[in-house]
Image (cartoon, coloured by chain):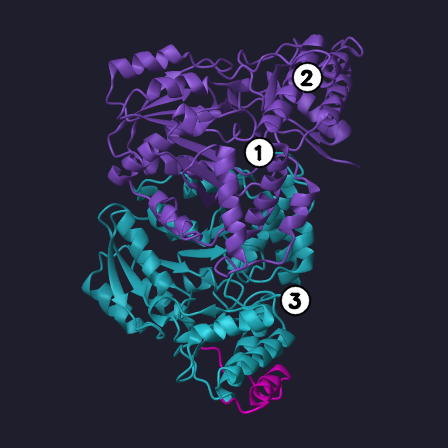
Chain colours: A purple, B cyan
C-alpha cells in the first residue's frame, strides 16, 4: 500500500536525491569531495541569501540553534525570546542550559508576536544581547513578522537578531543580508527535501564580532572552527557525506526552480490548502499562517487525534497532530518541500473522507473546488502574511 | 572506473544497507518508526555488550565524546587523558573547552599507553574524576590496553572509565559491562558500515550516578533527556531517520555473523595485512597495532604522501596518509567494516604496484603470499594485541 508523508518534517525525498545519496561513499578528505562541498557551499549562500559562509553541522536543527547561542553570547547575558510554541520554548531551554537569562515574550499559541512588543522590550533594556525567534513556529503553524523584527533589532548595535528558520528557509523569502538578520538556522529535513541529519547556521559580520567575545563553552558546535575549515573547503569533523551528496542534488533542483519559483510554489500550495480548509467549514488555528504548514482546528466534537489516526489507518497518511496543550485540538498539514498541486488535492480528499467517517458533515467538493481555483490561477493566492 | 575506499572511516557501505536507506522516509513520531527504533536499540545493546540503553545522537562521533564529558563531569574537575594521537588530543580539547582540567599522559605516537602510568596517576591523585582514552587511536593505528585500564579504574569509586571506541566497536572485543567500562562512545561510519551521521554513547550505572551530579552545560547532547525519550522508544530531537534505517539493516547483518565471527574476521584481515606488509619489506608504525587499521612506515626515501597520491591517481583508491607530525611518514590501510579477504589481496597488490613506481623494490609476490597463508588458515593470525 502506498504511504504518504504530510508532516512538517521530515518531508518526502525526491527520487533524484535518494539516488544521489546511494552513490559510493566519498571520503571527506579526498579530492573527490572538494567540488561537492564547494558547490554545496555556494548553493547554501544562494538559498540563505547571504554572502558569508553558511556553516554545516552533522546534527538535527536543534544543534545549530544551540550553537547560535553558545557562540555569540556569554554567561549572564540577557536574551529576548519570542515564546509562542514548542520551538520558542526550545530557545528558552537552550538559554537556561547555558546560564543566559531568557526574557520571554509569551505569545498565545496560534498568534504571531507583535513587533512593538520587541521594540518596547529593547527600549526598556537595551542591554539585551539577542532576540531569538522563529520564522515559522511549526507547532502552531504561525509565521512571525521576520522583516519587521529584523528592522527593529538592527538599530541596536549590541543586539543580535537570531532566527530559527528551520521551517522557513526554502519556503518563503528571508533575505538575510538585506534585512540584516544576524544568524539564520536551517535544517535538512524540511524544504531542502533531505533526510534529517544536517543543520545550518548562516552568520552575519555583526554576529561574527559577537563570536569573538563569547565565553560560553562549545566544542562540537564551534562556529570559529567550522568557519576556518570551510574556508579551506573542508569540515572540522567527519561530515554526513551522504546527506551532503543529497544536498548538492536538492540544491541543483531548487536552483533550477529559482527563489521566486520556490516561494511562489509554497504560497500557492499553502493558500490553496487554507482556502480549501475554510470551504470545508473548518477554521485555521494560526492567526498569521505560515506557508510551511497549515494548522487547522479540529471541528467541534471531533478529537483531532482521531483525524490523525484515521488518516494513518485508512490511508497510511502521516500528518501531525497538536503538541502539548494543543493535543487533540488541532491537526497540521505540511506543504513544505517536495510537494506539488496534486499532493494538495489528495490530502484534501483524504481529510474529507476521514472527517465524514468521524461524523463531521463536509460539504462535498467544496474544498477541492476552492483549492483548484487557486492552483489553476483563476483566483489569486491570499497575500503572503510574512511581513 | 571503479573506486575503492580503504580509509579508516568513512568505510564502504554494503548494498543492502544503501537499499534500506533509500526506503520511503518514515516519520519519527509515527507508529511505523517504533519497531525500527526498538530493534536498533536492542541491536546496539548487543554490539556494545551492555544491558543499559545505548544513546543515539544525530552527529559525528565527536558529539558523543563531548557529551561523555559534559554529562558526567563538573567545572574544575580533573580528568586523566591518554594523549597518543589526534583523537587523544580531542579529549584534551573537549575538557579545556568546558573548564575541566586535563591531566595528559603523553604517549609517543605509535605506542600504546602503559597501564601502570594510569595506576600511578590515580594513586597520586585519587580525586581524578575520569580517565579518557581511545580503544583504537586511528591516527597512529595503535590499540590501547582497554581491559587493563578498565581493571585499574574500576577500583576507584569516584573515577569513570570513559572510552572512545569509535573505531573499536564491531572490530574487536570490548565487553563493556564485563570489564566495567563506564562510557563507550561509538560512531556509524566505521565497523557499523554506515555513512557518517550517527554517534552513540553507552552509559554504565556508575556513570549515570555522575550524570545526576554533573554541572557542565549541555542541551543537544543531554544524556538524561535522550535516555528518558529512548525509554519511551523515541528520541529527543528529530533523529537521522535514514541512517537509523540503515543501522537496522547493518545490525541484522552483523548479528547474523555473530560477535565472535566479526572479531575473528577483523583479526584475520588485520593479521594478514600486517604479515604481508612485513613480507614486502616494510615496517609497521604502531608498536601495538589495532585490528581496525594498519599504519605502515613509508620506506626510506619514499614520501608517504606520494604513496597515497599514487594509489588515488593510478587506481582511484583512497587510503589515509599520516596526520600532523606523521604527514608523509606513514600510510594507513583500513580493514574495519565491510571488507573481506579479497579486499586485502587487492589493496596489497595496489600498494606493491605503487611502491614499485616510486622506486621501492618490493620482492614480488611475497606480500600476497604471506597474507594468503593467514587468510587460508594455513598460518594462525598473530595473537590479538588488545589486552
Within the image, what quadrant is residue A345 found in?
A: top right
Say which of marks 3 and 1 sits in front: 3
What's the distance in space between the residues labelled 1 and 2, CA to CA?
Answer: 20 Å
Q: Secondary structure at mark 2?
A: helix
Q: Are marks 3 and 1 in contact (CB under 8 Å)?
A: no
What's the distance in space between the residues labelled 3 and 1, CA to CA?
Answer: 34 Å
Q: Which mark is residue B211?
A: none
Q: Is residue A79 left or right of residue B315?
A: left
**In the image, which residues are magenta?**
B361-387
Q: Residue at x 67, y 18 (%)?
A: A273
Circle 2 sits on which residue?
A: A272
Circle 3 sits on which residue?
A: B2
Q: Residue at x 25, y 34 (%)?
A: A75
- Inspect this view and state whether residue B160 appears: no
Circle 1 sits on which residue?
A: A190
* Residue A121 vertical position relative to residue A98 in the rendered view, above or below: above
Question: Which one is nearer the viewer's eye here, A90 or A132?
Answer: A132
What's the distance in space between the residues labelled 3 and 2, CA to CA?
Answer: 49 Å
x then y, percent, for residue A145: 46, 17
Q: Residue at x 60, y 18 (%)?
A: A295
Magenta run includes residue B383: yes
Q: Residue at x 26, y 34 (%)?
A: A74
Question: Crowding at label 3, few (<14), some or many (≥20) Cα neighbours within 10 Å?
Answer: few
Q: Secondary structure at mark 3?
A: loop
Chain under callout 2: A
Within the image, what quadrant is residue B43 found in?
A: bottom right
Amino acid at each position: 500500500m502506498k504511504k504518504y508523508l504530510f508532516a512538517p518534517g521530515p518531508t518526502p525525498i525526491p527520487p533524484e536525491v535518494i539516488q544521489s545519496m546511494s552513490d559510493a561513499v566519498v571520503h571527506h578528505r579526498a579530492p573527490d569531495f572538494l567540488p561537492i562541498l564547494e558547490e554545496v557551499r555556494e548553493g547554501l549562500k544562494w538559498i540563505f541569501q547571504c554572502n558569508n559562509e553558511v556553516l554545516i553541522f552533522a546534527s538535527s536543527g536543534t544543534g545549530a540553534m544551540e550553537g547560535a547561542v553558545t557562540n555569540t553570547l556569554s554567561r549572564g547575558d540577557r536574551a529576548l525570546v519570542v515564546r509562542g510554541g514548542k520551538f520558542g520554548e526550545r530557545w528558552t531551554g537552550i538559554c537556561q542550559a547555558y546560564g543566559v537569562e531568557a526574557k520571554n515574550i509569551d505569545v498565545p499559541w496560534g498568534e504571531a508576536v507583535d513587533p512593538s512588543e520587541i521594540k518596547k522590550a529593547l527600549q526598556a533594556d537595551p542591554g539585551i544581547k539577542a532576540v531569538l525567534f522563529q520564522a515559522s513556529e511549526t507547532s502552531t503553524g504561525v509565521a512571525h513578522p521576520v522583516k519587521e523584527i529584523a528592522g527593529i533589532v538592527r538599530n541596536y548595535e549590541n543586539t543580535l537578531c537570531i532566527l530559527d528558520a528551520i521551517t522557513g528557509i526554502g519556503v518563503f523569502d528571508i533575505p538575510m543580508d538585506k534585512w540584516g538578520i544576524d544568524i539564520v538556522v536551517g535544517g535538512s529535513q524540511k524544504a531542502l527535501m533531505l533526510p534529517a541529519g544536517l543543520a545550518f547556521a548562516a552568520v552575519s559580520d555583526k554576529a561574527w564580532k559577537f563570536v569573538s567575545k563569547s565565553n560560553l563553552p562549545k566544542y562540537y558546535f564551534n562556529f570559529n572552527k567550522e568557519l576556518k575549515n570551510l574556508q579551506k573547503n573542508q569540515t572540522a569533523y567527519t561530515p554526513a557525506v551522504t546527506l551532503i551528496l543529497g544536498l548538492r542534488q536538492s540544491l541543483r533542483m531548487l536552483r533550477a526552480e529559482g527563489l521566486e519559483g520556490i516561494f511562489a510554489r509554497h504560497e500557492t500550495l499553502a493558500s490553496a490548502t487554507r482556502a480549501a480548509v475554510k470551504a470545508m467549514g473548518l477554521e485555521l488555528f494560526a492567526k498569521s499562517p505560515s506557508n510551511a504548514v497549515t494548522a487547522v482546528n479540529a471541528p467541534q466534537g471531533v478529537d483531532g487525534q482521531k483525524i490523525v489516526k484515521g488518516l494513518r489507518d485508512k490511508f497510511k497518511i502521516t500528518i501531525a497532530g497538536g503538541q502539548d496543550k494543543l493535543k487533540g485540538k488541532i491537526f497540521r498539514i505540511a506543504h513544505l518541500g517536495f510537494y506539488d498541486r496534486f499532493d494538495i488535492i489528495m490530502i484534501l480528499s483524504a481529510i474529507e473522507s476521514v472527517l465524514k467517517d468521524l461524523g463531521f458533515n463536509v460539504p462535498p467538493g467544496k474544498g477541492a473546488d476552492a483549492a483548484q481555483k487557486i492552483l489553476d490561477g483563476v483566483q489569486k493566492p491570499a497575500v503572503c502574511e510574512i511581513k
